[in-house]
Every structure is written in C-alpha cells, then in structure tokens.
Image (spheres, rainbow, N blue to C red):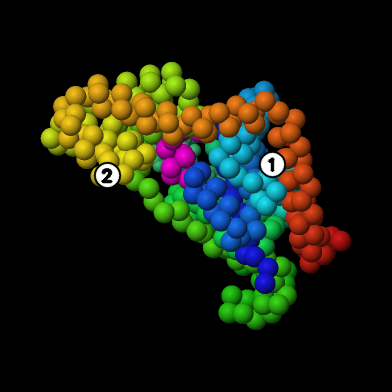
Amino acid sequence: MSKKILLSGVKPTGRPHIGNYFGAMKQFVDLFNANDYQCYFFIADYHALNFIQNAAEMNQNILDLAIDYLALGLDPKTAVLYKQSDVSAHTELSWIFDTIVTMPYLMRAHAYKDAEAKNKEINVGTFNYPVLMAADILLYDTDVVPVGADQKQHVEYARDIAEKFNFIFCGATKDGKNADKAIFKLPEPLILESVATVPGTDGRKMSKSYNNTIPLFATREEITKAVMSIVTDSGGPEAGGIPANVYAMHKLLKSEAELTSLYDTNKGKYKALKEALIEDMDAFIKPLREKRVEIAKDSQAVIEILRDGAERANEVASKKLSAVKKVIGVL
Ligand code: ADP
Ligand code: TRP
C-alpha cells in the first residue's frame, strides 16, 4: 500500500529561534523522518513575498531556511524539499481557484480580519493567501498537513475549496455522489502537540517581532548575551526563589528531576542558574550549529537539493494541473 502524503510549507522570513524549534520545526522533522508518510516540504517564498520585498533578503532567507532544515536532519532523499516558486502549478492553480472562491468567504479568514482590525493596508496577495495555500496543499493529493493551531483555518479553507471545485467541475457532491470523479482529495490538519509557549528573554512569548529570542543556531556569545538578559524579576510566578523564565527555558532541555536538584541547590542564585542554562543551551545548540556551518559551506549543494526537489514536485504537480485543466475545459 502506498504511503499517505504529508505536506508542509514554511515562509522564509528570517532566522528561527528556539520557540519555533520546539513549537514546530522539531515536530516537522520528526514526522518527516519517521518514515510513515511520503513527505513534501516546501519553502513558501511566494507567500513570504507579501512581507519581504527585497531580492537579496529573499534570496538569503530561502537558502538559510533550506540549510536550517537540513541541519536539523531533514533527509532530502526521502522528503521532497523544494521552493514554491519553482513549481509554477501552485500559482496557476491558485488563479483557477480564485474564480470559484468568493470575497465574503475570504473576508472571514482570521489573518485578514486581524489585519483589517489593525487598520493595515491589505494587499491582494495577503487577501488571497488562503487560496494559494489551498493550491499548495491540493496539488499533491495531500492527506495530512501538520500545522500549529493558528493555521488550522487555512487547512479548512483548502478542504472547502477542494469540495467546491469537485462539485462544480466533477459533479462530486459532499454526500459521496460521483466520488470517483473528484479531482481533489480532502486534506486533514494534523495539529501539532502544543508545547507550552516558549517564553522569550522578557517573559513574553518568544517571537521575532518582540526581539526577545534565542536564535536556534546561536553562537555561544549570542546564547550568553540572551540568557544573561532574561528578566528574572518581572512579577512572574517565581515561587521559592525559582526564576520562572529561566526555568521555563531550562525545562525544554532537561528533565524536571534533573532541574529540581539544580534549582534546589541554587535557590535565589540567579546568576548561577543562568550560567547553568547557558551551559545546557550551548550543549544543545552546538551540534546543530556545527552541522549548519558544515552544510552552509557548500551552498551550491543546497541549491542542487532544491532543484532536485523541484523536479520531483513538478512531476506530481503538473499531472494534477493537467487533470484540472481538462475538467475546466482549457486542455
Ligand atoms: P514569530 O512569532 O517569531 O514570528 P512564527 O509566527 O513565524 O514566529 O512561528 C512559526 C511557528 O513556530 C508557529 O506556528 C508556532 O507553532 C511556533 N512558535 C513560534 N513562537 C513560539 C513560541 N514562543 N513557543 C512555541 N512555539 C512557537
Ligand atoms: N501559512 C503557513 C504559515 O504561515 C505557511 C504555508 C504556506 C503552508 N503554504 C502552506 C503550511 C501549505 C502548510 C501547507 O506557517
């Protein structure tokens, strides 16, 4: 029996931090390498174009993201690793979907509503974001899409769009009539197990936008600087001399049993506890950082991996697009 298809995309929007790692990336890589699924993993550069409109930055971010995932152990021989813009079927199918998706429906998207509530100027690309994402997913007969809770609605959009297309052009109904004629498979979201939100150095959620991160591939110096700046007296639940933010980060790296003795011995000694966290953080990051440096030395090889991935993705996507073109009557 052939394997189920798992697909995921990540926008190349900058250096990942340990919140991204424990909240999403680690779980992706584990899923990809568990060998239970045929996996597609792509760099959503056309989605990122809504935010990054600078060629040098885009180029660098794409390469960096590919290197990041390779350094985390994603095996490009088994998983198909590619960038969205290399498979033009994504944008082509997105246009086709645009003709059956209504504006009021897209206006219900959380991301759109948030942007509107903040009175932001919204470009058409942001408005259409869920349509391109539906195309990303549906081109590959995807069974499951691993996402954080914030992306669940987008997977539901992909399902709705698939159903609508299947109905209009293939006569397949929701209750199963003409199911064999349907072109698109309905994907399921696989909601990632929620790790407690990783706090940043200031105690708020670790986020690029708050400038409170520890980069995933940080140097020893960066780790030291970030950990030393962790706020220890910001009114968090610091029961019994335990600095909450330091402890929360430490818990990602060590078991509670190990931490209990460390924190008991060093009650109230924030500096010693931070030094212990620096050691543990560096021990965790060092092998990843070193692997990343190795991979980054040969950027040509990384570009080759993306090229090879694009070829494999194109093979699948172009077949699906041909089937679509046939049923809409342009082929
Ligand atoms: P940022 O807030 O830094 O811009 P993103 O929104 O790009 O991060 O996050 C990408 C994914 O990483 C999210 O879907 C979420 O699952 C995970 N993530 C981000 N920040 C954290 C955090 N502080 N703790 C846990 N998971 C996180
Ligand atoms: N919207 C996703 C995010 O912001 C990225 C993405 C684009 C994606 N296309 C996708 C994720 C298809 C899963 C499947 O994180």
The disc placed on residue 95 is none
- What secondary structure is the stretch in magenta mostly built from? helix
The residue identified by callout 1 is 83
Label 1 residue near ligand 2, CB within 8 Å:
no
Range of magenta residues: 16-24
Looking at the image, is 167 positioned above or below residue 244? below
Q: Is residue 104 left or right of residue 44?
A: left
The residue identified by callout 2 is 256
The residue that appears at 46% across and 50% down in the rendered structure is 148
Helix, strand or loop at disc 1?
strand
Q: Which of 300/152 is in front? A: 300
Residue type at tag 1: Lys
Q: Residue 231, position in %: x, y? A: 27, 25
Residue 197 within the segment the image draws in magenta: no
Q: Residue 311, position in %: x, y? A: 79, 47
- The quadrant of the rendering that contains the C terminus is bottom right
Residue 21 within the segment the image draws in magenta: yes
Label 2 residue near ligand 1, CB within 8 Å:
no
- The quadrant of the rendering that contains the N terminus is bottom right
